Amino acid sequence: MFLSKVTMISSPQTAQELAKLQRNGVYASHQLIWQLFSNVTERSFLYREEMGITGMPEFYVLSKTEPQASLPIFSCVTKVFEPKLKKGQRLSFKLRVNPTVCVKGDDGKQRRHDVMMQAKYNVKDELSDAQTLKMHMEQAAINWLNNEKRLDEWGITLDFQPSIDGYTQHKVQKKRHQIQFSSVDYQGMLTVQNPLKFINQYAKGFGRAKGMGCGLMMIKRA
């Protein structure tokens, strides 16, 4: 695997790309990152977008192949990513993920819903105080991440309840279709219980909407 930090360099072409990002958010980011992998036919990367200190977007990209920063809008620093992890090792983490829950509709079909919006819907007639409602929605998102079965599949446990740093609802236009999804930013501490499981999941990404900037976990040794 390769881990890259991709920054945008000021230029007339960069200004055009920034305008696209403002118009169509994460889908424009998705298309932008694809330009680093023009020789690849299927997506084999995860990315996380952040705002740099210069006010320009920065991207952290995890990929199976080394990105090719052939366009003048990019500055790309890449290193081989082969973390050596042991059972019981503690890591701090940041994760942007798309947490969903399956709900059966009136027609009997299962559909995926935003876990925080579903939590709001479930208590809309019971909780009127905005702060209490916000806490209830955030707890639903925390419970999603803290699910024992999910964490076991990922090969980790959480050392304590993670914090939520952000919640964003995205609406993007993809050709003739509009895509809607939400992302939640978590941070906290984890303990590696099964290094092989964790690394395998890490390479695949966590949760859904991985092509739209979700699923890349940023880790640091505690």
Image: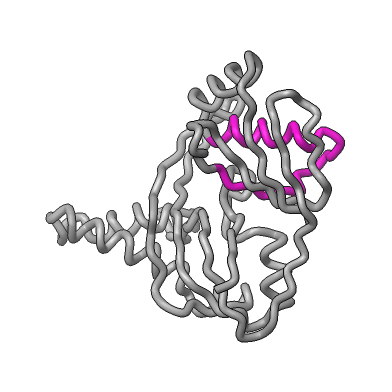
What span is colored magenta in the figure?
26-49
| Residue 9 screen position, x and y as percent | 64, 27
Question: On the picture, is 121 further left or further right than 84?
Answer: left
Residue at 55% over, 75% down: 151
Taking the view exactly as shown, the residue that stands out farthest to the left is 129
Residue at 72% over, 61% down: 203
Residue 57, above or below 123: above
Which quadrant holds residue 208? Answer: bottom right
Magenta stretch: includes residue 39:
yes
Chosen colour scheme? one colour
Residue 160, above or below 108: below
Question: On the picture, is 191 further left or further right than 40?
Answer: left
Residue 106, above or below 49: below
| Residue 128 screen position, x and y as percent | 13, 55
The N terminus is located in which quarter? bottom right
Question: On the picture, is 37 further left or further right than 105?
Answer: right
Q: What is the total number of numbered labels drawn onto the structure image? A: 0
Which quadrant holds residue 40? Answer: top right
The C terminus is located in which quarter? bottom right
Of 143 and 121, nearer the camera is 143
Residue at 47% over, 68% down: 145
| Residue 85 screen position, x and y as percent | 70, 77
Query: Is there any visible trace of residue 183 in the rendered image?
Result: yes
Question: On the picture, is 48 further left or further right than 133?
Answer: right
Which quadrant holds residue 168? Answer: top left
Taking the view exactly as shown, the residue that stands out farthest to the front is 54
Magenta stretch: includes residue 74:
no
Taking the view exactly as shown, the residue that stands out farthest to the bottom is 88
| Residue 71 screen position, x and y as percent | 76, 25
Of 201 and 101, nearer the camera is 201
